[in-house]
Amino acid sequence: MSAIIIKPFFHHDTFTISYLLYDPQSLKAAIIDSAIDYENNSGNIAFHFANAQIEFVKDHKLTLQWIFETHAHADHLSAAHYLRAQLGGKIAIGKNITQAQRVFKDIFGFNDDEVSVSGEEFDVLLHHNETLHLGDVAIKVIETPGHTKDSVTYLIEDNAFTGDTLFMPDSGSARCDFPGGSATELYQSIMQIYSLPDNTKLWVCHDYQPNGRELQFQTTVAESKKSNIHIRDDVSQDDFVAIRQTRDKSLAVPKLLYPALQVNIKAGRLPQENKRKQVFFKIPVYTPPAESK
């Protein structure tokens, strides 16, 4: 059997790498972490990025079987719903998306008809160590919480798609200061990844190109254990938690945080239209407490 074929797509506006992969025998395909083109300043939405993936699927006569999310992203808007409408396939995410839905339903004040807390917006909720198939190719689901509660890694042959859990070695690891985040859990999740064979390829979901270097999106377990700036294999849990929590305090809020979460906890669906066929995102406003006199 031929090895699975992996085609990366780079969404420059959000530094997101989405992966289109397919089994060359059955021509069944999956897309991981696709993105909508969204301009925060104007509110304009387009689908140029997702359309490039759709074009690839059609040009190679593939059948889209799966649309995978590694978690509910806070830095780009998911194109999962759009892809399914255009090509079919099932949208899948970790089962703990329900916890994210519960938290952000409350934050945004959504009604029951706007978002569930059951994950019903997704076709499949994934469990730890569950095995799926892409054609004849097995896909193992590994729960890797820490960045978010619903984070999962997809292990396909000798390829691990880590989402935001790990970045390239010179970028480290994901932040843990979102609701449900935990640096302790992230450490334990990364140790799961580090227990994979050293030659396992790690495919990351973001590359911010530190110091202006060229785009990179694939490393190995061995290289990450040796040189990851946050978590080599000789870094203790306590040291990692201290590093991660200190760094998180210095990070700005992602610029697409609120639009992204309103879409991504609903499998890529935009908010409901109002009577004028308009769509709006909600932005919470946090005011400082009144000064005592």
Image: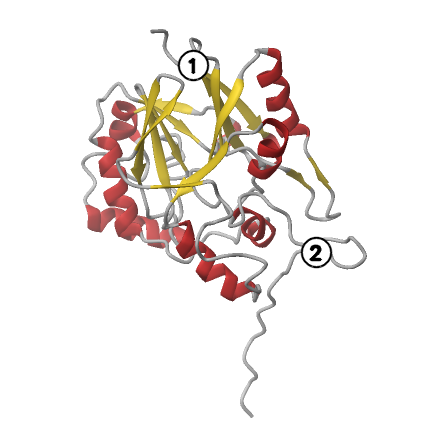
Q: Position of residue 185 (x, y in %)?
A: 27, 49
The extreme top residue here reads 1
Q: Which mark sits nearer the N-terminus, 1 or 2?
A: 1
Q: Amino acid at mark 1?
A: Asp
Residue 187 can be seen in this image: yes
> Residue drawn 57% across and 65% down?
111
Q: Amino acid at mark 2?
A: Phe
Report if the CB atoms under discs 1 and 2 are less than 8 Å apart. Answer: no
- With respect to residue 250, does 27 lie above or below? above
State the separation of the CA atoms marked 1 and 2: 39 Å
- The residue to which callout 1 is attached is 23
Q: Find residue 280 and name its label.
A: 2
> Residue drawn 36% across and 10% down?
3
Give the colouring mode of the picture.
secondary structure
Neighbour tally class for label 2: few under 14, some 14-19, many 20 plus, Cα within 10 Å: few
Q: Position of residue 162 (x, y in %)?
A: 37, 33
Q: Secondary structure at mark 2?
A: loop
Residue 214 can be seen in this image: no
Neighbour tally class for label 1: few under 14, some 14-19, many 20 plus, Cα within 10 Å: many
- With respect to residue 203, does 175 lie above or below? below
Tag count in the figure?
2
Q: Name the side, left or right, on which 97 lies relative to 287.
A: left
Q: Position of residue 129 (x, y in %)?
A: 26, 36
The quadrant in which residue 141 appears is top left
Q: Position of residue 10 (x, y in %)?
A: 56, 26
Q: Considering the image in quadrants, where does the N terminus appear?
A: top left
> Residue drawn 73% across and 48% down?
43
